[in-house]
Amino acid sequence: MKVFCIAGLQVKLTENPYYLADIRLVLLGSAGEGKRSVGNTILGREEFSSQKTALCVTKIGAVVGRQVTVINTPGWGREERLAQTPVSVQEQLLQCVFPPGVHALLLVIRADKKFTEAHRAALQDHVEFLGENVWNHTMALFTCGDWLGEIPVEQFIYSEGAPLQWVVDKCSYRYYRIDNTDRADVTQVSKLLECIEFMVAMNKGRCFEIDNQRHKAEVIKGSYQEKAMQQMRKRKQQNMGTWDDPMLNRCKSARISLTMKEEDKEAK
């Protein structure tokens, strides 16, 4: 009998009635959370290179009787708000959920780093950028499962406080821990896929996707915001260059006065 946890419930299956022969996944998260390692663990081999990329990378493989498509997205700064993220990265995030869409978005979070309110706000910005219904298709995936050791995931979530609890609540208490150091353990990947299949069943088999019109609108909006940020930075730099400091002005006046007095002495 198979057992896994989702939405705060222990779900027991003698057989898996939610089985999907083809599963499409997106890995979301800030830079350095371990998305690449998660992708390699799911596929059971080194498919995603360690080289940083500003583009989505898609890999496909046969995993425990299913065809699994894993899309790794470029990360953002851990405490970087959406307005600070380059438009090119925003566009990549949107493209990964084009039709036919994806069955699940895995929100990758490191368990060995403190989850702060700034991290939560940045994460909310980037996830909700994809659309209002995105949380219905999202699951929190905690990496560094080996670091947690025997600590139950529930205890870890509680100990991290309100910011992480908010994320888990938005995911309707769908969460999973994974140990990227133990790729020989096929069971952890099999259980993860079963969790995803159950979530898809709760969404009545619907995938998450956005249309091209929404994509174009978001890109235009993002371009405008980025230009506005650039103009603000430029004005700030210009203002720093022409900063009117009274003390500095007095020093300049004193130097000019002293120079004039010295010139008068030389003339006499």
Image (cartoon, helix red, strand yellow):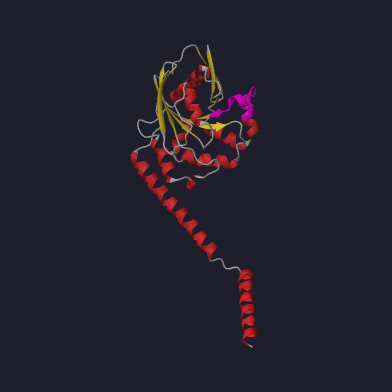
**Which quarter of the figure has residue 26?**
top left
Decide if residue 27 is in sight here.
yes
In the picture, measured across the screen, residue 254 lies left or right of residue 36, that is: right
Q: Is residue 5 magenta?
A: no
**Which quarter of the figure has residue 160?**
top right
**Which quarter of the figure has residue 267?**
bottom right
Frontmost residue, 206 versus 101: 101
Frontmost residue, 104 versus 166: 104
Where residue 32 sits: x, y (%)? 54, 35
Where residue 258 sits: x, y (%)? 64, 78
Relative to 175, does residue 74 appear above or below in the rendering? below
Where residue 211 sits: x, y (%)? 35, 37
In the picture, measured across the screen, residue 103 lies left or right of residue 115, that is: left
Q: Is residue 154 magenta?
A: yes
Relative to 110, does residue 226 appear above or below in the rendering? below
Decide if residue 198 is in sight here.
no
Where residue 16 sits: x, y (%)? 46, 15
**Residue depicted at 48% across the width and 40% down the height:** 126
Frontmost residue, 136 versus 175: 175
Specify the farthest residue to the left.
Answer: 213
Name the quadrant of the C terminus.
bottom right
Frontmost residue, 36 versus 148: 36
The magenta region covers: 141-156
